[in-house]
Image: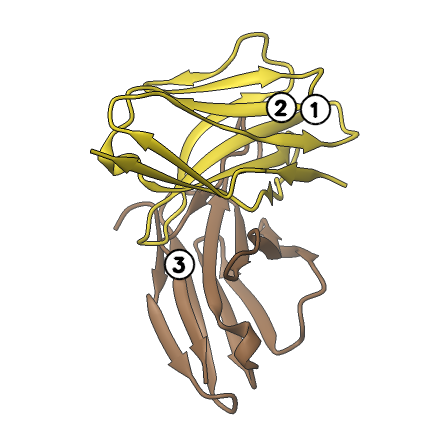
Chain colours: A brown, B yellow
Amino acid sequence: ETGVTQTPRHLVMGMTNKKSLKCEQHLGHNAMYWYKQSAKKPLELMFVYSLEERVENNSVPSRFSPECPNSSHLFLHLHTLQPEDSALYLCASSQIGDYNNEQFFGPGTRLTVL
Amino acid sequence: AQKITQTQPGMFVQEKEAVTLDCTYDTSDPSYGLFWYKQPSSGEMIFLIYQGSYDQQNATEGRYSLNFQKARKSANLVISASQLGDSAMYFCAMGMNSGYSTLTFGKGTMLLVSP
């Protein structure tokens, strides 16, 4: 595996379900990010982990719970979601100190909440 | 706070022609970076080109070039010799140049390349 991978690629869940999105980066980076992309809206940053510590949480509802067990893995735990949470969830990673702070993105998980 | 504005919801171009996608930004930070990403229908965000706020020359990467006009706070993407595979959403983004970088994205421009 190379780059940033995300599983599952597609997820359909009911409002009472609990599920988790997984992201893995194979680039040796030390920062990881979760973004939400809703239809016709710009990407919204949800969470940032820098050196495995959460450094930003952009007013995200508590039904979204991130976890970063090590520098290569990032999870987004989902619980009692709403239909408006249906979106593409993108994970990204970067190396702090790189000259341009470029973020490398995974292919995303397309989530549908029924 | 940073803000990115992309005023073109959609653009059409014929194959082999050049096209310019507009991007203006707003920030009070003196040190920042500007990025362009391509998002095909598969969903993955693909990095295209980067311009640092202190870079003296406009960035170029193959068929992509960035027309950086700092005084006007614009960072337009120029794609030369368009190809059918260039059809996708294009996002302009801005990030800071220190520490971890949270990117602020524009709403994107859908580019359609016709034969």
| Residue B74, label in figure | 2
Q: Nearer the viewer, mark 2 or mark 1?
A: 2
The answer to whether residue A62 is above or below residue B106 is below
Q: Which residue is mark 3?
A: A108
- Tell me which residue sits at (53%, 24%) in the image: B76
- Tell me which residue sits at (25%, 51%) in the image: A1
The answer to whether residue B55 is above or below residue A74 is above
Q: What is the chain identity of the residue bearing mark 2?
A: B
Q: Hey, which quadrant is residue A41 in on the image?
A: bottom right
Determine the residue located farthest toward the right in the rendered image. Answer: B28
- Answer left or right for B58 relative to B78: right
- Tell me which residue sits at (49%, 20%) in the image: B66
Task: Give how far apart the Cα atoms at labels 3 and 2 are.
Answer: 29 Å
Q: Nearer the viewer, mark 3 or mark 2?
A: 2
Task: Give how far apart the Cα atoms at labels 2 and 1 are.
Answer: 15 Å
Task: Give how far apart the Cα atoms at labels 3 and 1 are.
Answer: 30 Å
Q: What is the chain identity of the residue bearing mark 3?
A: A
* Residue type at numbered disc 1: Ser
| Residue B31, label in figure | 1
Q: Position of residue B30 (x, y in %)?
A: 75, 23
Q: Position of residue A71 (x, y in %)?
A: 49, 53
Same chain under badges 3 and 1? The reply is no
Judge by depth and name the residue closer to the eye, B60 or A101: B60
Q: Position of residue B49 (x, y in %)?
A: 44, 26
Q: Is residue A8 visible?
A: no
- Numbered disc 1: secondary structure: loop
**Residues at discs 3 and 1 in contact (Cβ within 8 Å):** no
* Residue type at numbered disc 2: Ser
- Answer left or right for A79 relative to A53: left
- Answer left or right for A107 relative to B95: left
Q: Hey, which quadrant is residue B53 in on the image?
A: top right
